[in-house]
Image: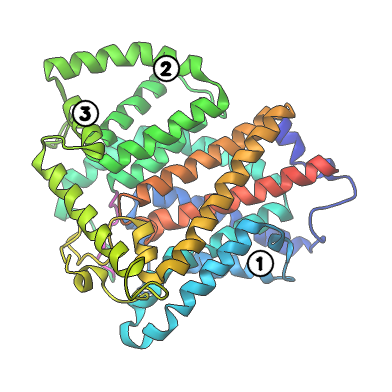
Amino acid sequence: MSDLVDATRPAAYGTQPVRVRRGDAAIRWHDWYFATLLLAVAGYAIFGKGFAYAGLPPIFPAEVLLALGLLTFVWPRPSGAILSSPALVLVLAGIAWTLIRTVPYIGQYGIDAMRDAVILVYGLFAIVVANLILERPERIRDALGWATIFFSINALVVIPIYLLQTVLGESMPRWPVSLTPILQVRGGEVAVHLCATAVFALLAFKRSSVLWTIVLVVDIAFVASLSRGGLVSIAIPLALAIVLSGRIRPFLLAGAVIAPLLALFYVGGLQIQLPGIQRTIDVGQIVDNVVSIAGSSGDKGLDDTKEWRIGWWQQIVDYTLFGEYFWTGKGFGINLAFDDGYAAPSLEGQPLRSPHNGNMTILARAGVPGMVLWIAILATWFSTLLWHVAKARLAGDRDWSNLFIFLTCYLLAAFINASFDVALEGPMIGVVFWVVFGAGIGSVMVYTRLETR
């Protein structure tokens, strides 16, 4: 990634900096915040809900980070550079509509209304991150260096952490006030970061030993057997990365070794028993998860869950697209599960509030206008990144192209997970999603400036 590193040095900009020069104190403060935000992303990835709920309710890491991030945006002076990005302008429009549909319900639902609204309000993280990258493009280089460390560690701790949380169960230590376990991860969330780990290695941003690669494959098989959404969150973005990067040969070589082993495990009904828990890595379960996505798997539990979700999603479509909530949705604050007649406890034992699909959550709460803005936000971002993947590749800037591929696949993994689970509604994936979103826009704007220098 030498050309990318060199391009993000200040010398690459000659006498035309991206933004007005700021005082050293402000730059140091912004560097500190940027590093802290990326460390928080690692915290969400490794500790899950345990990191998200470390603090005193209702003030948690995401709220503190967002407040500090907005401070970097306005101090020592506000910046209007991000307004040149159509994607970020659409994000601001989405946030505005969300607040319009939230404020009337704060009196009735209190903190629940504000928590529901974060699904789009966390988009402020995208604006903060894009602005920080525009201010100092060297932060791209720094972020890639820290990402190399994180992804190297992430593959090694996935299964041990899951084993630890399963073995300890109710004995897991809890935070004093929120009473949330200090370690609580879910398969779908783990899958998003595993996908990013695999894509990062595929694009050769880090050197990978044979042993590390084997561990990563075992991690992916484990998560794929745990979560249907996790399986898709890994498979589709990884396949896209292979196609866009043209790195098909390494994938075929790995597949030539792995595929026969998986076939042997499936035919023989073999399982890998993990120590200390009843969970196994079962190829048959992975196959059932794949089949159940498009049709009936024969597994009653999988099929019933699928029918339950589809029924709820259809009801949301009926009362928005074809019903009385077309323009307004039901607003942010109301418990959709109770109001729609689908009340059930979540996996953590708390009352379910929203459908297992972030898109349906936005449609139900913000109506068709909110959904149109959401589609526009996603379409603009993905089209922008994919256009610059091709543009950088044609210009011979392979490292830039790979950076755009990585960010595209990371965000796609988070989006797919959010289409199967309650993900964007919380900070564990919500914050990560919008940080990657902002990193994509900021990187594109830096690359565009480099083209015209």
- As drawn, 437 above or below 280: below
User: Badge 2 local density, few (<14 within 10 Å), some, or many (20+)?
Assistant: few
Residue bearing mark 1: 73
What element does badge 3 sit on? helix
N-terminal of the pair, mark 3 or mark 1, is: 1
Verify whether residue 196 appears in magenta.
Answer: no
Residue span colored magenta = 178-185
- Mark 1 vs mark 2, foreground winner is 1
- Which residue in the protein does label 3 denote? 287
Question: Can residue 54 be seen?
Answer: no
Q: CA distance from mark 3 to mark 2?
A: 26 Å
Res. 257 image quadrant: top left
Identify the image quadrant of the N terminus.
top right
Name of the residue lying farthest toward the right: 15
**Which residue is nearer to you in this view: 431 or 233?**
233
Instruction: Identify which amino acid the numbered label 2 is placed on.
Output: Val
Is residue 20 toward the left or the right of residue 247 in the image?
Answer: right
Q: Which mark is residue 210?
A: 2
* Mark 1: secondary structure: helix
Is residue 167 visible in this depiction of the protein? yes
**411 left or right of 398?**
left
Name the dominant secondary structure of the magenta segment. Answer: loop
Question: Picture coordinates of residue 288 (x, y %)?
Answer: 18, 32
Q: Give me the disc on residue 277.
A: none
Residue farthest bottom in this picture? 107
